[in-house]
Image: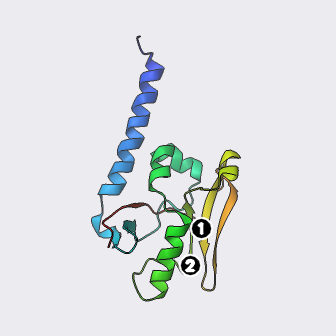
Amino acid sequence: MVKTTGQKIKETEEKLKELKGKKVLEENKSDWVKIPELGIEVQSKIHHKNKSYDDLVEEFGKEFLEENLPTYKQLQDLRNLEHNGKYKLGLIDTWEFVKQEDEISKKNGYVARFYAYSGYCYLYCCRYSGNSNSYLGVRFVRKGKKK
């Protein structure tokens, strides 16, 4: 079967997204913090602020985000470690995208966000993927060696 020019362009765009994601994971090694207690490495700073989830999908692809966004549980655990004097990740005052693990919300096209303030934090699953905010950003995680 001969591929149309449109199909070739789409495949090339998907490959470019994949390469952009790999580049983000590989560059700026000093921006990654090893968390042996959780068996992960996490970016120390939030980036891509004022971008919607749709913008992130356009840049990196949905599959990349599904694999590399932190879960709510991971951020909760990191926040507790930070509170106990380990690591400096800024999880006391943060607003970032996390992996959507609520199947009902995911089916409805909602994305999940993690909010943390000085006294509390919570998961908000029912936001549209096109919403953005100057404080809202993303940080990625990758597997590391477990303690």
* x, y percent for residue 29: 28, 65
- The mark found on residue 96 in the picture is none
Question: What quarter of the picture does the N terminus occupy?
Answer: top left
Q: Residue at x 48, y 21 (%)?
A: 6
- Is 126 placed above or below 43 here? above
Of badges 2 and 1, nearer the viewer stands 1
Q: Look at the numbered discs 2 and 1 and tell me whether their residues touch, using CB distance below 8 Å.
A: no
Whole-angstrom CA distance, mark 2 to mark 1, is: 10 Å
The crowding category of the residue bearing disc 1, from other C-alpha atoms within 10 Å (few below 14, some 14 to 19, many at least 20), is: many
Q: Is residue 132 visible?
A: no
The crowding category of the residue bearing disc 2, from other C-alpha atoms within 10 Å (few below 14, some 14 to 19, many at least 20), is: few
Q: Residue at x 50, y 50 (%)?
A: 66
Q: Say which amino acid is labelled 2.
A: Asp
* x, y percent for residue 31: 34, 68
* Label 1 element class: strand
Left or right: residue 30 versus residue 58 is left
- Is 85 placed above or below 121 here? below
Left or right: residue 89 versus residue 128 is left
Answer with mark 2 or mark 1, whichever residue precedes in sequence: 2
Give 105 or 93, whichever is nearer the viewer.
105
* Label 2 element class: loop
- The mark found on residue 114 in the picture is 1
Q: Residue at x 49, y 62 (%)?
A: 70
- Is 110 placed above or below 117 here? above
* x, y percent for residue 48: 49, 59
Using the rendered view, name the quadrant where residue 43 is placed.
bottom left
Q: Name the residue under label 2.
A: 93
Q: Residue at x 64, y 81 (%)?
A: 120
